[in-house]
Amino acid sequence: MSTVESYDPEPSDRRDPLIAGLGALATGAPAGLLDRVAARWVRVDAAIGDVYVAMTDQGVAYLRAEQDEDEFAASFRSRFARPLLPGGSPPPALVRALRTGRAEGLHLDLRGLRPFEAAVLRAAATIPRGEIRPYAWIAERIGRPKAVRAVGTALGRNPVPLLIPCHRVTRSDGLIGQYVFGMPAKERLLRMEHVNLDEVGTLAAKNVYFVGSDTTGVVCYPSCRDARRITPAHWHGFRTLGQAERAGYRPCRHCRPGGAAP
């Protein structure tokens, strides 16, 4: 006898005709069918407070910090054409990712993204914890150097902020820029990750956006882990990457100023 899965819809689920239809099947739905057509939501404690997370059978699909589950469900349904059901306890990998800011090993379901949006998020996902990159870096990295504004729009639509760290993308003028959870939350996240925001801002006020070491001949973004090791005696600031290159410096292989691909 084949294994079947039955589901008795709760009153709140009867508003969704698909869930109601599955619950009314005389013989029950095939095993696993419900999780292939519906998403499950959980509430998790994150660095910015409680967040709601929707997961499919393919991975985490949506994350937002709404007021309550009804508001989250409405937000989810505005973007996804699938039912949303309670999901019980959050997976340990999700809890760990939201506490540490590192999503290695966590599966994400990013189906439905436009190719440009997917490229933007893939680039943002490479930014290490404790560092930031300008929007223009993303645009250069994906081969669309003139699409800086579109990069910002794509990051604003990031379905899984915190897990894909769009908060690590900032403005080229030293300001942190907008964020789906608000600018105060973005600043709080970056400071928790020990990004040298005050130094970046001070340098930007002096029109310094790149720093180099005359011992290595390498130029970096100020938040780069290598830039933060430069001693004052060997530190040089530059307004543009081109200015640094004309002075004989080469782009850092870690932070890749200019967005050069690996």
Image: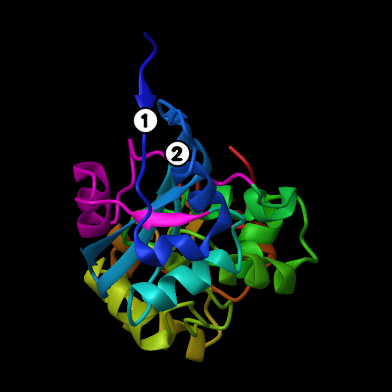
Residue drawn at (33%, 40%) of the image: 104
Q: Which amino acid lies under the numbered mark 2 shown in the image of this protein?
A: Leu
In the picture, measured across the screen, residue 113 lies left or right of residue 189, that is: right
Circles 1 and 2, Cβ within 8 Å, touching? The answer is: yes
Mark 2, secondary structure of its residue: helix
Q: Nearer the viewer, residue 207 or 152?
A: 152
| Residue 251 in view (yes/no) | no
Q: Which amino acid lies under the numbered mark 1 shown in the image of this protein?
A: Glu
The residue carrying mark 2 is: 34
Q: Nearer the viewer, residue 210 or 231?
A: 210
Q: Nearer the viewer, residue 143 or 49?
A: 49
Residue drawn at (62%, 59%) of the image: 138
In the picture, measured across the screen, residue 162 lies left or right of residue 159, that is: left
Instruction: Name the spot of residue 255 as percent of width and height, x first.
Output: 48, 52
Q: CA distance from mark 1 to mark 2?
A: 8 Å
- Looking at the image, residue 195 lies above or below residue 124: below
Instruction: Name the spot of residue 15 as percent of width and height, x first.
Output: 50, 65
Residue drawn at (60%, 69%) of the image: 78
Instruction: Name the spot of residue 24 as percent of width and height, x first.
Output: 48, 44
Mark 1, secondary structure of its residue: strand
Part of the protein shown in magenta: 83-111
The label on residue 163 is none
The residue carrying mark 1 is: 5
Q: Say whether residue 85 is magenta.
A: yes
User: Which of the 4 image quadrants contains residue 11?
Assistant: bottom left
User: Which of the 4 image quadrants contains residue 172?
Assistant: bottom right
